[in-house]
Image (cartoon, grey):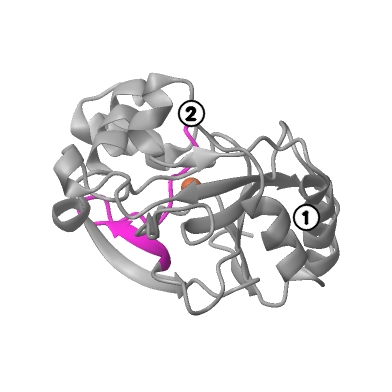
Amino acid sequence: MAGFVRVLDDFYPHPLRVREFATKLEYAENTAEAEKLYYKGYLSTADHPFAEAGLELLARRLGRVLRRNAPIGEFRLIFETEGAPADGFRKTWIHFDSSVSQYSGIVYLNPDAQCQGGTAFYRHRELGWDHMPNVASPEMAEACQRYGKTVPEFLSMITDDGFEIDSKWRELSVVPMRFNRCLVFDSRLFHARLGGFGARQTDGRLTQNFFFDVVM
Ligand SMILES: [Fe+2]
């Protein structure tokens, strides 16, 4: 399913209950410094009933058997100030997640009146790529040769480029946030969160995030 993007609206049968549950959880920053560079928000643990329930709903809506490789389905909160230009970084970072899983899923859990931005997809201007090829692919070998870099050096260049949003990338499409919408996409696609908002657990950008593989 190369380039797969699907929007599943009305994802949870009782989304207000999920939101209510999520807004009462405890959140913490990533503990690893390196992670904090890329993800400037707060995370719950995945140790709650909606993690499994969400993955099951995803399997049903996609009509596929899914597998997760690690605990997933945590809630994430991002506020207006997180990663703002004053911090020396843009508010977001363009990246791919295929080193984690085949697919990514994001459930937006803010009421429509709070929703801003969404998730955007991009093409790398120089490479012409809208997704990250497999590291063992001929495409990758050719690109590494062209840039005179090893695979790890090349990956690190793409990671750095992720912060150079306007000069290195062209935005291809945006999926707007909407309450109880689940966006599912091929994790190889270059993408970024658009914005952060609010200042409290009750008005910050609240999502639930899944990373999974399709077994069949
Ligand atoms: Fe991502």
Image location of residue 18, percent across then percent down: 73, 60
Q: At 39% from the left edge and 45% from the top edge, which residue is drawn?
A: 95
Q: At 67% from the left edge and 61% from the top edge, which residue is drawn?
A: 19
Confirm whether residue 59 shows in the render. Answer: yes
- Identity of the amino acid at label 2? Asn
| Neighbours of disc 2 within 10 Å: few (<14), some (14-19), many (20+) | some
- Identity of the amino acid at label 1? Gly
Label 2 residue near ligand 1, CB within 8 Å: no
Residue 127 included in the magenta stretch of the image:
yes
Q: Nearer the viewer, residue 1 or 63?
A: 63
Q: Secondary structure at mark 1?
A: helix
Image location of residue 145, percent across then percent down: 26, 30
Disc 1 versus disc 2: nearer the observer: 2
* Residue behind mark 2: 30
Pointer 1 with pointer 2, Cβ within 8 A: no
From which residue to which does the magenta span run?
118-135
| Neighbours of disc 1 within 10 Å: few (<14), some (14-19), many (20+) | many
The quarter holding residue 10 reads bottom right
Would you say 113 lies left or right of 129 here?
right
Q: Nearer the viewer, residue 112 or 183?
A: 112
Residue 125 included in the magenta stretch of the image:
yes
Q: Closer to the N terminus: mark 1 or mark 2?
A: 2
* Residue behind mark 1: 54
Q: Secondary structure at mark 2?
A: loop
Label 1 residue near ligand 1, CB within 8 Å: no
Q: Tell me the distance, in whole angstroms, between the alpha carbons under discs 1 and 2.
A: 22 Å
Image location of residue 216, percent across then percent down: 84, 52
Image location of residue 40, percent across then percent down: 38, 40
Confirm whether residue 215 shows in the render. Answer: no
Q: Nearer the viewer, residue 199 or 75?
A: 199
Q: Main secondary structure of the magenta part?
A: loop
